[in-house]
């Protein structure tokens, strides 16, 4: 079945692995993407704050600073043609006491050191004029006009779909548990005993990147998940803010922000808790309560609105403050580890980095001629642009106005959805304020009619 | 004749549930020539379409029937009376080009469309607050439903949903969920309510949960949902763990207020539906609101009576072109959670079990007072307009005020 051996296997189908697979698929190479879950983009890449960062607050001189800045340029340029919704709202950093206000010039200087010169300091009155719904106690601020919102799900999907269109093989439900590096080939074994042979391997395994790294006989970093919980508010809250409202970062964390989403909701979060369990993607009472308390101070009226979703994501934090990017020519192996809290933005730059490291390790990767490359053009899901229902069609999910055609399309094609969650990421069906109260039956029936499985399979009914 | 004067005007009803359909039927009976009901689902009928048990139609049709039969009867009456039913069309917004006209923006299967209306009746109904909006922590496994989503899957799509469920809530609709689960072959491990007792009629509780020996766990709430892919258990606030593969969140009514909010209407605090006066006018000329959008939630027949009532107000507006200057809220004091007008008078809710005399005052003067009794939260409490001392409205100078004399 599988056309082995591959030139390169990418382990991990998060946004980083998908970006790598996409870039490699544009070379004359046999590529495969191995993902443990049933779908791409279903790990940390599905649960973040969805901001396309300028990198103004990164550590100057770090790999992260360089790759976030580069990734921002690349993704910003790529998104429109691929149909990934991006919205240029900008952000305002808000100081809530004198100490924070006094810290703003230092942050502005850091931004400049990172090559970001568009930031502008504001006094309290200017901040309030920009964001009249802010709570009491603003002491100053800084405008960061370049911060963008992005559709995080479409990003992973677009990368993966483009990779597949250009010949990459996506192997889902393949958890790599063993690696054997031979003279010419590396054998990867998956949980159910399947073997995949490849010349080169890219480790993009996110939270499990350190485990895979050790299986290749390397060491140097250990992932300790940092959980971030988030609350998404109803779209009726969207008029409460014009742009992303950032806190003044501390040494420990970027802090809790309030941000619009490209879908027109408002997001509050994330928290930052160091935990040991790499599967603890649940929200907690303490986390939710802490967020509400912060939100009440930042944007009091936000708390009067209904909540649409609560979720948590795990950052692949390590003992180091920077990305862990390594390569071994002997093992024909590249590691993209410790991609903590900026990986969505940096994804395309990390792909470039991976290709460079692969080539340095001996991979020959001649570019595919342009006329043989296929692009991907998704239907953008953002509220700022036109949505399919506006041209007609039967609306099935009413809160998000998703049409039957969109649902059917998401259940077929090269990378179809397999469960309601996957459908939600592809179309926004069932992701709205009613969470399926009105539409779960219709959505599910349509999905089942499209791919021939039963509604029970779609719903995960035991 | 009023019927002639208004015959050329079009009235648009948004939402084809019991309230909207009943309004449309009554408007036709009273001589309005063009009555259009816009319904976003493929079938009109609203929530009763998928509530398969008895309990519908008593107050409006004068017979007791099941939800689907009730919905079908209303649709049939509407068609019989010449109501134009536009199913599969969503109202997306309104324009107010002049003081006496409203444009209704639609998204239809063939594209956008605009209808011009002399009056619009909002009847978009209500939903149940889902798990996320209740801020219940835990992972997000499959197997979490609301009564509405459960009943659609079971009644309209003949699905099983799981084998063992916990029902969150113990009001009327929660017991309706117990029936549906039983019908779908799913046992109920427990019903859970933070209140000290269930909030339905004893007979209903006995006939549904009692007969099936479903324990009602009082004074506890769900603290966490356990399970990665599929629900494995719920943990209660007292630390108890109940193994189950399904959780149904019931009640927790939120009006479908998006259109009303986007049209700039003032909302009743607590109820979250558009504020109306006794004749069901909203704060926007030409816009009326009825049904569970206004009072979350009453039984379907009460919503239907709203529909009949609003027809008279719509006709007055079409003939006289008069609109009240201001829509005043009914002020409430805890434990009264909210109060609003509806077809039968005033409907209100309390948010705890409270014993005492419920009192309606106006400028310090008592308009209505009850005998001492226990008021039950999550249950509809009605003060009939005929029972109030002053029936001439609007009340001048002061707002009506509701409280409980303990
Ligand atoms: C709360 C929060 C907020 C964030 N906000 C932002 C933001 O606003 N902007 C931004 O740019 N970034 C943000 N991030 C960071 C961003 O989400 C991550 O950096 C990015 O998603 C990491 O992608 P990844 O592909 O490395 O990891 P993942 O998405 O975790 O993907 C790794 C994949 O590898 C698979 N895998 C693991 N081990 C194996 C194996 N052995 N075999 C096969 N498959 C395997 C996993 O199943 C997983 O799908 C945020 C993160 C969090 C948690
Ligand atoms: C789960 C559940 C169980 C219930 N059980 C009972 C019971 O046993 N007995 C009882 O008497 N009552 C019951 N009720 C209460 C009652 O049946 C309903 O709430 C009642 O149907 C309300 O009538 P309505 O017309 O106000 O709203 P709905 O019946 O909700 O109708 C509103 C309609 O408006 C449509 N709509 C909304 N927005 C738009 C838009 N923008 N454009 C076009 N159309 C739109 C909707 O699709 C819907 O069809 C139950 C309610 C629920 C939710």
Image (cartoon, coloured by chain):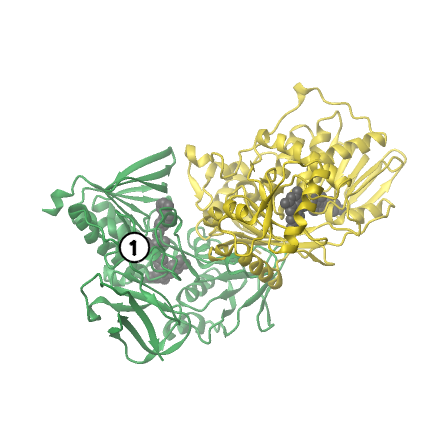
In depth, the one of B17 and B53 nearer the eye is B17
Residue B132 in the figure: left or right of residue A212: left
Residue A35 in the figure: left or right of residue B177: right
The answer to whether one can see residue A14 in this image is no
* Residue position marked by numbered label 1 in the rendering: B290
Task: Determine the residue positioned at 74% across, 59% down.
Answer: A276
> Which chain contains the residue that carries disc 1?
B
Residue B178 in the figure: left or right of residue B302: right
Q: In the rendered image, what is the letter of the chain coloured green?
A: B
Q: In the rendered image, what is the letter of the chain coloured yellow?
A: A
Residue A187 position, x and y percent, is 83, 39
Report the residue that reaches farthest toward the left: B1
Residue A200 position, x and y percent, is 81, 35
Residue B80 position, x and y percent, is 21, 46
Rendered-image quarter of ligand 1 = top right
Q: Is residue B405 above or below residue B161?
A: below
Residue A265 position, x and y percent, is 51, 47
Task: Determine the residue positioned at 55% across, 56% down.
Answer: A137
Ligand 2 within 8 Å, label 1 CB: yes
The answer to whether one can see residue B311 in this image is yes
């Amino acid at each position: 079945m599988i056309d082995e051996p591959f030139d390169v296997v990418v382990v991990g189908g998060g946004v980083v692995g998908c970006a790598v697979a996409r870039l490699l698929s544009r070379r004359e190479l046999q590529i495969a993407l191995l993902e443990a879950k049933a779908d791409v983009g279903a790990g940390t890449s599905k649960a973040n704050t969805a901001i396309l960062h300028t990198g103004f607050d990164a550590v100057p001189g770090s790999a992260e600073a360089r790759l976030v800045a580069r990734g921002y340029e690349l993704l910003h340029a790529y998104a429109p043609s691929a149909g990934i919704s991006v919205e240029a709202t900008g952000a305002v950093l808000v100081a809530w006491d004198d100490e924070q206000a006094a810290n703003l010039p230092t942050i502005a200087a850091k931004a400049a050191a990172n090559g970001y010169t568009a930031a502008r300091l504001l006094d309290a009155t200017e901040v309030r004029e920009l964001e009249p719904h802010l709570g009491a106690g603003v002491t100053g601020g800084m405008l960061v006009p370049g911060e963008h919102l992005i559709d995080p799900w479409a990003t992973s999907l677009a990368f993966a779909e483009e990779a597949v269109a250009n010949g990459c093989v996506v192997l889902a439900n393949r958890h790599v548990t063993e690696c054997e590096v031979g003279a010419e080939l590396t054998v990867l074994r998956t949980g159910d005993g399947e073997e995949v042979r490849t010349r080169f391997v890219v480790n993009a395994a996110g939270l499990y990147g350190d485990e895979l790294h050790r299986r290749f006989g390397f060491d140097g970093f250990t992932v300790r998940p940092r959980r971030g919980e988030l609350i998404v508010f109803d779209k009726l809250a969207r008029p409460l803010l014009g742009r992303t409202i950032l806190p003044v970062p501390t040494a420990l964390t970027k802090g809790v922000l309030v941000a619009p989403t490209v879908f027109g909701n408002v997001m509050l979060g994330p928290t930052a808790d160091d935990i040991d369990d790499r599967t603890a993607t649940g929200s907690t009472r303490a986390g939710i309560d802490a967020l509400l308390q912060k939100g009440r101070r930042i944007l009091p009226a936000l708390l009067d609105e209904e909540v649409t979703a609560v979720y948590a994501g795990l950052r692949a934090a390590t003992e180091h403050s920077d990305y862990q990017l390594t390569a071994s020519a002997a093992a024909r192996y590249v590691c993209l580890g410790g991609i903590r809290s900026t990986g969505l933005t940096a994804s395309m730059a990390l792909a470039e980095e991976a290709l460079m490291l692969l080539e340095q390790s001996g991979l020959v990767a001649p570019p595919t001629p342009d006329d043989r490359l296929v692009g991907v053009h998704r239907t953008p899901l953002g509220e700022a642009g036109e949505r399919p229902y506006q041209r007609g069609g039967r609306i099935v999910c009413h809160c998000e106005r998703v049409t039957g055609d969109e649902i059917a399309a998401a259940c077929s094609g090269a990378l179809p959805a397999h469960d309601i969650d996957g459908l939600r990421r592809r179309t926004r069906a069932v992701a709205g304020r009613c969470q399926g109260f009105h539409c779960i039956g219709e959505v599910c029936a349509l999905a089942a009619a499209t791919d021939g499985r039963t509604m029970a399979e779609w719903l995960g009914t035991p | 004749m009023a019927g002639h004067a208004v015959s050329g005007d079009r009235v648009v009803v948004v939402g084809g549930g019991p309230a909207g359909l009943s309004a449309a039927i009554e408007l036709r009976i009273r001589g309005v020539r063009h009555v259009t009901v816009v319904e976003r689902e493929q079938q009109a009928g609203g929530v009763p379409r998928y509530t398969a048990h008895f309990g519908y139609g008593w107050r409006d049709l004068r017979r007791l029937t099941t939800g689907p039969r009730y919905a079908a009867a209303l649709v049939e009456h509407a068609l019989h009376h010449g109501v134009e039913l536009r199913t599969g069309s969503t109202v997306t917004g309104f324009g107010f080009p002049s003081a006496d006209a409203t444009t209704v923006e639609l998204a239809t299967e063939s594209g956008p469309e605009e209808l011009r209306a002399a009056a619009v009746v909002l009847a978009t109904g209500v939903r149940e607050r889902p798990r996320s909006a209740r801020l219940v922590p835990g992972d997000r496994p499959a197997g979490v439903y609301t009564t509405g989503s459960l009943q659609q899957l079971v009644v309209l799509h003949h699905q099983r949903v799981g084998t063992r469920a916990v029902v969150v809530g113990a009001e009327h609709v929660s017991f309706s969920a117990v029936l549906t689960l039983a019908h779908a072959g799913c046992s109920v491990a427990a019903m859970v309510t933070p209140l000290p007792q269930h909030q339905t009629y004893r007979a209903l509780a006995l006939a549904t949960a009692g007969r099936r020996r479903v324990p009602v766990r009082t004074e506890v709430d769900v603290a966490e949902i356990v399970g990665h892919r599929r629900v494995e258990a719920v943990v209660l606030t007292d630390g108890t763990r109940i193994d189950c593969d399904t959780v149904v969140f019931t009640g927790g009514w939120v009006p479908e207020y998006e259109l009303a909010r986007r049209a700039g209407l003032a909302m009743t605090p607590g109820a979250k539906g558009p504020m109306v006066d006794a004749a069901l006018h909203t704060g926007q000329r030409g816009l009326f609101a009825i049904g569970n959008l206004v009072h979350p939630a009453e039984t379907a027949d009460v919503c239907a009576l709203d529909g009949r009532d609003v027809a008279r107000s719509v006709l007055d507006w079409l003939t006289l072109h008069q609109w009240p200057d201001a829509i005043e809220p009914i002020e409430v004091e805890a434990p009264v959670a909210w109060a609003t007008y509806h077809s039968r008078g005033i409907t209100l809710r309390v948010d705890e079990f409270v014993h005492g005399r419920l009192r309606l005052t106006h400028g310090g003067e008592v308009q209505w007072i009850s005998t001492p009794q226990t008021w039950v939260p999550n249950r509809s409490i009605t003060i009939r307009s005929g029972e109030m001392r002053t029936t001439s409205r609007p009340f001048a100078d002061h707002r009506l005020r509701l409280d409980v004399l303990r």
